[in-house]
Amino acid sequence: MDRLFLIIVMLLLSQNVLAGEKTITTSDGVDLYVKVEGKGTPLLYIHGGPGSGSYWFEKLTGEFLEEHFTVVYLDQRGVGRSQSSPTQDYSLDRMALDFEEVRAALGFKDWLTLGHSFGGILQMGYAQRYPSSQKGMLMINCTLNLTESACESWLPKAAEYVGETYSCAGDTVALPQRMNDYGRKLQEKGLFWKMGSRDPETFPKLDQMSGEIENFNYDLSNNVMKRSEYWQNFKLLSGSMKMPVLYFYGTHDYMVGPRHYQDLQFSNLLLWENNGGHVPFIEDSNDLEKAVLAYKEKYRV
């Protein structure tokens, strides 16, 4: 009987009985949209934006990733198909706890995480608070220091594209507001795409995909950037983290900064240079897939 039971369990696991869409309710009563697909080591997608959601990522790279991992697509609280926090709790403590509660609800002992852009901040905050939960981190065009990304890349490059010069030194306007100002100027001139793309249609494609979600929730994106805790230098934590890390960066990614990889101190680091921008899921998918497979083979995850 024990042997038969074991065989049944193995069969169920091989078929991924967790697969499909589900709602996971957090300890503070927020319903989170979660979808599980694929096979292999569990991998949580931690989207950026902040507030971009998991939908376009699933559509663009889900087929590849699901061949190698059990992928967990999560719309973070206040994003996409997930509910807002009734108390406006979008603190880093709460975001990390959401990830932990999703992991526990799905029954995973630990998992890999794959972050994009602002997702790197969330990965680091999660690792700081729950160090045994992430067995590895894949960081795709991630910032680990918003202030550095803004002052050394985003704002100077945006100013250059609109025919101005900019330095954070001496500026009394808060960085989120200054980024909004230059973002608006870029949009007015039709130049925003140059910040992280070779093709002016790349960013609109992401917006179009997200637009397929009815009543898309933007609450997180309207709140997070105002919180000082997200503007810490999370690179300073990298030296204490022992899990294997893939850091994939673009030499023309001015959203994060083409030299943002400098000063990383991860002890198990696979650094991957891509001659592209901020959205390799569209423009450099082959190179991204090579990087993921190289990471998987090197660290046997």
Image: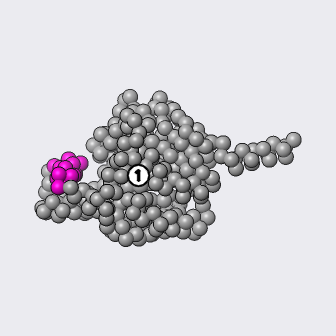
Is residue 208 or residue 180 the one in the foreground?
208
Amino acid type at image mark 1: Gly
* 47 in relation to 26, above or below: below
Q: Is residue 213 visible?
A: yes
Residue sitting at x 43%, y 59%: 281
Name the image quarter holding the N terminus: top right
Tell me the crowding category of disc 1: few under 14, some 14 to 19, or many 20 or more residues within 10 angstroms, Cα based: many
Q: Is residue 101 magenta?
A: no
Q: Check disc 1 and report its element: helix, strand or loop.
A: helix
Is residue 169 or residue 62 the one in the foreground?
62
Number of labels in the image equals 1
Where does the image place residue 77, in percent across and percent down from the top left? 42, 38
Which range is magenta?
173-189
Where does the image place residue 126, in percent across and percent down from the top left? 46, 49
Residue sitting at x 14%, y 54%: 171
Is residue 250 or residue 243 the one in the foreground?
250
On the rendered structure, is 262 left or right of 104? left
Q: Is residue 188 magenta?
A: yes
Residue sitting at x 18%, y 62%: 161
**Residue corresponding to mark 1:** 119
